[in-house]
Amino acid sequence: MNWLTQKFGIIDHHKNTDFGTQPIRVLHYMIVFMFNNTNKDFFLNLQKLIREGKFNSELNFEFGEEPIMIENGRFRTPYANLHTKQITIHETFLSYIWCITYSIYVIYLEEIDFPKYNKLHNREVYPIKEENKQLAYEMFNYAKHLIVDYTPWEKDILPNPERFLAENRLYIEQTNGFYTEAVKFIFCHEIIHLELHFDKITSETTDSHYLEYEIEADSKAIESIKAGLSDVQSPFEIAKKTVVSVGAVIGVLSMFFFKATTEGKQHPNSEDRLTNILEMFNFHDSHEIWGIACVGLKFWDNQFGHNFNWLENPTSYKEEYYSIVEQIKSRNILK
């Protein structure tokens, strides 16, 4: 466990017991642990679902050095299987989530949070490093590439959770925390489908019913996650709530980058899913969660050339966020 205090040199987390071939493999056990411990009663409820035949206890990790896109608009994105009662998730999608998380978080710090803090204190408290921003944008480009074409993650060049310099560990280990929470939200969403919806699905189930199920799955997933948080206003609990909420927000933001539109016949519009989650956590107007949401939407804006009008001096990033959502709807991007 010397890596815990290591300050210089290479940290390599890979073990022969890891399953998979991509660097994200070193976090597979952690996402299972975090999912099982969503809240104090969560694992007991999973056991109950297993006894009732609603949930297969084995998460179905799919492996293969292949892109997320399959064909004809189909993707290797997470889903709950109606017949096997398993939650399936592909290793390339998990790599994609980590890369998206790293990109959004680092750009938020380097382009929003650090400059704001330095300006507030009238000195350079946090140095702004162009190389950090460049790596973040490279990670986003790699994540986008994984959607349509698989290429190996260059773990001796690009940030990754498996092999990195101890000197660069901070952003990587912070990303690990947000990433595990993003995947936990996705798993919790799918478990709601298994618990509440699959018994209702027939050949006659309409799109409006699927839409209703998706909205309920998001909301109840957040309720389960919030049940694992404390109302105690200690630094640890405040930080934990931020990590958990940022993870859930990135879990939804990650779905924006698959297409230029936000509409889905059987899913809510992506901006409505995102807004629902942000509002359920009920943070104050200046909380960093709004800035992180805006960074994610800015990446999407640049990716597809929407050319949104970004406020020059927003009173808060919550104001900025709702301004962009209004533009998404007014420009009929969802159609």
Image (tube, grey):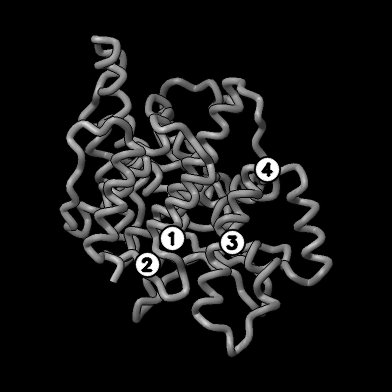
Q: Where is residue 29 in the image (x, y as percent from the top left)?
A: 62, 48
Evaluate if marks 3 and 2 touch, with contact meaning CB atoms under 8 Å apart. no
Which badge, 3 or 4, is on the more N-terminal residue? 3
Q: Is the residue marked by circle 3 packed among few (<14), some (14-19), or many (20+) residues within 10 Å?
A: many
Disc 3 to disc 2, how far (Cα)? 27 Å
- Res 127 seen here: yes
* Upstream in sequence: badge 1 or badge 2: 2
Any part of residue 149 in sight: no
Kind of residue at badge 3: Ala
Q: Residue 304 carries which label?
A: none
Q: Residue 318 location in percent, x, y?
A: 36, 38
SS category of the residue bearing label 1: helix
Q: Is residue 214 left or right of residue 307?
A: right
User: Quick one: quadrant of the C terminus?
Assistant: bottom left
Identify the element where label 4 is drawn: loop
Q: What residue type is labelled 2?
A: Pro
Write down the residue under mark 1: 92
Image mark for residue 227: 4
Report the mark closest to the observer, 3 or 2. 3
Pointer 1 with pointer 2, Cβ within 8 A: yes
Relative to 155, is 5 above or below? Answer: above
- Residue type at numbered disc 1: Thr
- Measure how far apart labels 3 and 4 are at the Cα level: 15 Å
To which quarter of the image does residue 204 belong?
bottom right
Q: Mark 3 highlights which residue?
A: 217
Pick the residue in front: 146 or 119: 119
Instruction: Choose between 327 and 75: the one closer to the eye.
Output: 327
Q: Against 111, is 89 above or below?
A: below
